[in-house]
Image: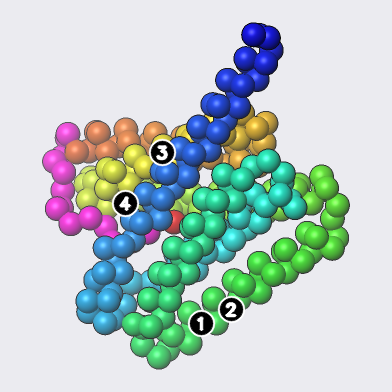
Amino acid sequence: MDPSGFLLSTYSVFTDAAGIAGNLFAIVLFVSPIPTFRRIIRNKSTEQFSGLPYIYGLLNCLICLWYGMPIVSPGIIPVATVNSIGAVFQLTYLTIFIINADKAKQVKMLGLLLAVFAIFGIIAFASVKLFQPPNRQIFVGYLSVISLISMFASPLFVINLVIKTKSVEFMPFYLSLATFLMSLSFFAYGMFKCDPFISVPNGIGTGLGIIQLVMYYYYSNAHGRGSREPLLVSYV
Protein backbone atom coordinates (compact mmCIF):
# COMPACT_ATOMS: atom_id res chain seq x y z
CA MET A 1 0.00 0.00 0.00
CA ASP A 2 1.22 3.50 -0.84
CA PRO A 3 2.39 5.09 2.47
CA SER A 4 1.17 8.53 1.40
CA GLY A 5 -2.24 7.08 0.56
CA PHE A 6 -2.40 5.34 3.95
CA LEU A 7 -1.48 8.54 5.79
CA LEU A 8 -4.06 10.51 3.80
CA SER A 9 -6.73 7.91 4.58
CA THR A 10 -5.83 7.90 8.29
CA TYR A 11 -5.85 11.71 8.35
CA SER A 12 -9.32 11.71 6.76
CA VAL A 13 -10.61 9.18 9.30
CA PHE A 14 -9.38 11.26 12.24
CA THR A 15 -10.87 14.42 10.71
CA ASP A 16 -14.27 12.79 10.22
CA ALA A 17 -14.14 11.27 13.72
CA ALA A 18 -13.47 14.68 15.27
CA GLY A 19 -16.38 16.21 13.35
CA ILE A 20 -18.78 13.42 14.34
CA ALA A 21 -17.67 13.59 17.99
CA GLY A 22 -18.21 17.35 17.99
CA ASN A 23 -21.75 16.84 16.68
CA LEU A 24 -22.57 14.27 19.37
CA PHE A 25 -21.25 16.35 22.26
CA ALA A 26 -23.00 19.45 20.90
CA ILE A 27 -26.32 17.59 20.96
CA VAL A 28 -25.79 16.99 24.69
CA LEU A 29 -25.53 20.77 25.11
CA PHE A 30 -28.56 21.41 22.91
CA VAL A 31 -30.77 19.12 25.04
CA SER A 32 -29.52 20.56 28.35
CA PRO A 33 -32.32 23.20 28.62
CA ILE A 34 -35.04 20.50 28.42
CA PRO A 35 -35.62 20.52 32.23
CA THR A 36 -36.24 24.28 32.04
CA PHE A 37 -38.85 23.90 29.33
CA ARG A 38 -40.54 20.95 31.03
CA ARG A 39 -41.01 23.26 33.99
CA ILE A 40 -42.30 26.08 31.75
CA ILE A 41 -44.82 23.75 30.07
CA ARG A 42 -45.89 22.25 33.41
CA ASN A 43 -46.42 25.67 35.01
CA LYS A 44 -47.70 27.31 31.80
CA SER A 45 -45.44 30.24 32.65
CA THR A 46 -41.92 31.41 31.82
CA GLU A 47 -41.57 32.65 35.43
CA GLN A 48 -38.28 34.55 35.78
CA PHE A 49 -36.52 32.69 32.99
CA SER A 50 -35.05 34.74 30.17
CA GLY A 51 -35.52 33.91 26.51
CA LEU A 52 -32.46 35.92 25.47
CA PRO A 53 -29.98 33.00 25.65
CA TYR A 54 -32.10 31.12 23.11
CA ILE A 55 -32.41 34.18 20.86
CA TYR A 56 -28.65 34.54 20.82
CA GLY A 57 -28.22 30.76 20.52
CA LEU A 58 -30.39 30.75 17.40
CA LEU A 59 -28.45 33.61 15.80
CA ASN A 60 -25.14 31.91 16.61
CA CYS A 61 -26.31 28.61 15.11
CA LEU A 62 -27.59 30.30 11.95
CA ILE A 63 -24.34 32.19 11.37
CA CYS A 64 -22.22 29.08 11.97
CA LEU A 65 -24.61 27.00 9.85
CA TRP A 66 -24.14 29.45 6.98
CA TYR A 67 -20.35 29.29 7.44
CA GLY A 68 -20.51 25.49 7.12
CA MET A 69 -22.57 25.51 3.91
CA PRO A 70 -20.72 24.47 0.71
CA ILE A 71 -21.51 27.82 -0.93
CA VAL A 72 -19.37 29.49 1.77
CA SER A 73 -16.92 26.84 3.01
CA PRO A 74 -16.72 23.62 0.96
CA GLY A 75 -15.83 20.43 2.79
CA ILE A 76 -16.90 21.15 6.38
CA ILE A 77 -20.35 19.55 6.44
CA PRO A 78 -20.14 18.59 10.19
CA VAL A 79 -20.19 22.32 11.00
CA ALA A 80 -23.37 22.74 8.96
CA THR A 81 -25.08 19.65 10.41
CA VAL A 82 -24.42 20.45 14.07
CA ASN A 83 -25.61 24.02 13.72
CA SER A 84 -28.72 23.03 11.75
CA ILE A 85 -29.64 20.70 14.63
CA GLY A 86 -28.87 23.48 17.10
CA ALA A 87 -31.04 25.96 15.19
CA VAL A 88 -33.99 23.53 15.33
CA PHE A 89 -33.56 23.11 19.10
CA GLN A 90 -33.28 26.86 19.70
CA LEU A 91 -36.33 27.60 17.55
CA THR A 92 -38.31 24.92 19.40
CA TYR A 93 -37.33 26.38 22.77
CA LEU A 94 -38.27 29.87 21.62
CA THR A 95 -41.65 28.67 20.35
CA ILE A 96 -42.41 27.08 23.73
CA PHE A 97 -41.18 30.20 25.53
CA ILE A 98 -43.35 32.55 23.45
CA ILE A 99 -46.46 30.38 23.80
CA ASN A 100 -46.16 30.34 27.60
CA ALA A 101 -44.97 33.94 28.13
CA ASP A 102 -47.15 36.87 29.14
CA LYS A 103 -48.27 39.34 26.49
CA ALA A 104 -45.42 41.80 27.00
CA LYS A 105 -42.78 39.08 26.77
CA GLN A 106 -44.47 37.56 23.73
CA VAL A 107 -44.30 40.84 21.83
CA LYS A 108 -40.67 41.39 22.85
CA MET A 109 -39.57 37.86 21.95
CA LEU A 110 -41.41 37.85 18.63
CA GLY A 111 -39.72 41.14 17.76
CA LEU A 112 -36.30 39.73 18.64
CA LEU A 113 -37.00 36.55 16.70
CA LEU A 114 -37.87 38.55 13.59
CA ALA A 115 -34.69 40.62 14.14
CA VAL A 116 -32.60 37.41 14.22
CA PHE A 117 -34.02 36.24 10.91
CA ALA A 118 -33.53 39.71 9.43
CA ILE A 119 -29.88 39.86 10.55
CA PHE A 120 -29.21 36.38 9.22
CA GLY A 121 -30.92 37.26 5.93
CA ILE A 122 -28.75 40.35 5.55
CA ILE A 123 -25.57 38.36 6.31
CA ALA A 124 -26.48 35.62 3.83
CA PHE A 125 -27.49 38.10 1.12
CA ALA A 126 -24.42 40.31 1.59
CA SER A 127 -22.00 37.37 1.62
CA VAL A 128 -23.37 36.03 -1.68
CA LYS A 129 -23.83 39.33 -3.49
CA LEU A 130 -20.77 41.22 -2.29
CA PHE A 131 -18.13 38.50 -1.93
CA GLN A 132 -16.67 35.78 -4.10
CA PRO A 133 -14.78 32.73 -2.77
CA PRO A 134 -12.51 32.74 -0.82
CA ASN A 135 -13.41 36.22 0.47
CA ARG A 136 -16.93 35.01 1.19
CA GLN A 137 -15.54 32.40 3.59
CA ILE A 138 -13.34 35.00 5.27
CA PHE A 139 -16.26 37.43 5.72
CA VAL A 140 -18.63 34.83 7.22
CA GLY A 141 -15.75 33.21 9.11
CA TYR A 142 -14.94 36.38 11.03
CA LEU A 143 -18.62 36.80 11.92
CA SER A 144 -18.79 33.19 13.18
CA VAL A 145 -15.63 33.66 15.27
CA ILE A 146 -17.05 36.82 16.88
CA SER A 147 -20.31 34.98 17.55
CA LEU A 148 -18.63 31.90 19.05
CA ILE A 149 -16.22 33.84 21.24
CA SER A 150 -19.13 35.92 22.54
CA MET A 151 -20.94 32.68 23.34
CA PHE A 152 -18.06 31.63 25.59
CA ALA A 153 -18.88 34.62 27.85
CA SER A 154 -21.52 32.37 29.44
CA PRO A 155 -18.96 29.96 30.99
CA LEU A 156 -17.00 32.99 32.23
CA PHE A 157 -20.12 34.12 34.12
CA VAL A 158 -20.53 30.65 35.62
CA ILE A 159 -16.85 30.46 36.59
CA ASN A 160 -17.15 33.82 38.36
CA LEU A 161 -20.28 32.61 40.15
CA VAL A 162 -18.54 29.44 41.36
CA ILE A 163 -15.65 31.48 42.76
CA LYS A 164 -18.02 33.86 44.55
CA THR A 165 -20.30 31.18 46.02
CA LYS A 166 -17.55 28.56 46.47
CA SER A 167 -20.15 26.06 45.24
CA VAL A 168 -20.51 24.01 42.05
CA GLU A 169 -24.31 24.06 42.14
CA PHE A 170 -24.34 26.45 39.17
CA MET A 171 -21.90 24.33 37.14
CA PRO A 172 -23.29 20.83 36.51
CA PHE A 173 -20.42 18.42 35.90
CA TYR A 174 -21.76 16.62 32.84
CA LEU A 175 -22.64 19.91 31.15
CA SER A 176 -19.12 21.22 31.78
CA LEU A 177 -17.65 17.95 30.49
CA ALA A 178 -19.79 18.02 27.35
CA THR A 179 -18.79 21.66 26.72
CA PHE A 180 -15.12 20.73 27.02
CA LEU A 181 -15.40 17.64 24.81
CA MET A 182 -17.40 19.48 22.14
CA SER A 183 -14.90 22.35 22.03
CA LEU A 184 -11.96 19.93 21.98
CA SER A 185 -13.50 17.89 19.15
CA PHE A 186 -14.15 20.94 16.97
CA PHE A 187 -10.73 22.38 17.86
CA ALA A 188 -9.18 19.16 16.54
CA TYR A 189 -11.48 19.24 13.51
CA GLY A 190 -10.46 22.82 12.76
CA MET A 191 -6.80 21.93 13.09
CA PHE A 192 -7.17 18.94 10.77
CA LYS A 193 -8.96 21.17 8.26
CA CYS A 194 -6.42 23.99 8.75
CA ASP A 195 -9.38 26.30 9.40
CA PRO A 196 -8.62 28.98 12.03
CA PHE A 197 -12.26 30.12 11.98
CA ILE A 198 -13.11 26.77 13.60
CA SER A 199 -9.97 26.02 15.61
CA VAL A 200 -9.41 29.41 17.27
CA PRO A 201 -12.82 29.91 18.99
CA ASN A 202 -13.02 26.23 19.92
CA GLY A 203 -9.47 26.37 21.25
CA ILE A 204 -10.67 29.15 23.57
CA GLY A 205 -13.68 27.01 24.47
CA THR A 206 -11.39 24.07 25.25
CA GLY A 207 -9.31 26.21 27.60
CA LEU A 208 -12.43 27.45 29.40
CA GLY A 209 -13.70 23.88 29.60
CA ILE A 210 -10.49 22.77 31.31
CA ILE A 211 -10.82 25.64 33.79
CA GLN A 212 -14.41 24.62 34.57
CA LEU A 213 -13.46 20.98 35.16
CA VAL A 214 -10.50 21.92 37.38
CA MET A 215 -12.72 24.27 39.39
CA TYR A 216 -15.42 21.63 39.69
CA TYR A 217 -12.88 19.15 41.05
CA TYR A 218 -11.48 21.71 43.50
CA TYR A 219 -14.74 23.12 44.86
CA SER A 220 -16.65 19.83 44.94
CA ASN A 221 -13.88 18.27 47.02
CA ALA A 222 -13.17 21.31 49.19
CA HIS A 223 -16.73 22.46 49.84
CA GLY A 224 -19.00 19.57 48.92
CA ARG A 225 -21.27 19.34 45.92
CA GLY A 226 -23.59 22.16 46.94
CA SER A 227 -27.22 22.19 45.93
CA ARG A 228 -28.86 19.10 44.53
CA GLU A 229 -30.77 21.20 42.01
CA PRO A 230 -29.01 21.90 38.71
CA LEU A 231 -29.04 25.37 37.24
CA LEU A 232 -31.96 25.63 34.85
CA VAL A 233 -30.36 27.80 32.22
CA SER A 234 -28.72 27.12 28.90
CA TYR A 235 -25.09 27.47 27.90
CA VAL A 236 -26.11 27.51 24.27
Q: Which residues are magenta?
A: 221-235
Res 161 label: 4
Q: Which residue is mark 1?
A: 110
Q: Report helix, strand or loop for mark 3.
A: helix
Q: Which residue is mark 2?
A: 114
Say if 14 sits above or below 28 in the image: above
Res 23 label: none
Give whichever of discs 4 and 1 has the lower sequence position: 1
Rounded to the nearest angstrom, the CA distance separating label 2 from label 4 is 32 Å
Nearer the camera: disc 4 or disc 1:
1
> Is residue 160 visible in this depiction of the protein?
no
Q: Report helix, strand or loop for mark 4.
A: helix
Q: Position of residue 36 (x, y in %)?
A: 29, 66
Nearer the camera: disc 2 or disc 4:
2
The residue lying at 22 percent from left, 79 percent from top is 43
Q: Position of residue 48 (x, y in %)?
A: 30, 75
The amino acid type, in three-letter code, at marker 3 is Phe
Q: Is residue 38 left or right of residue 81?
A: left
Q: Is residue 62 left or right of residue 231?
A: right
The amino acid type, in three-letter code, at marker 4 is Leu
Give whichever of discs 3 and 2 has the lower sequence position: 2
Rounded to the nearest angstrom, the CA distance separating label 1 from label 3 is 32 Å
Res 180 label: 3
Residue extending farthest to the bottom is 103
Are the residues flagged by discs 2 and 1 in contact, CB closer than 8 Å? Answer: yes
Q: Report helix, strand or loop for mark 1.
A: helix
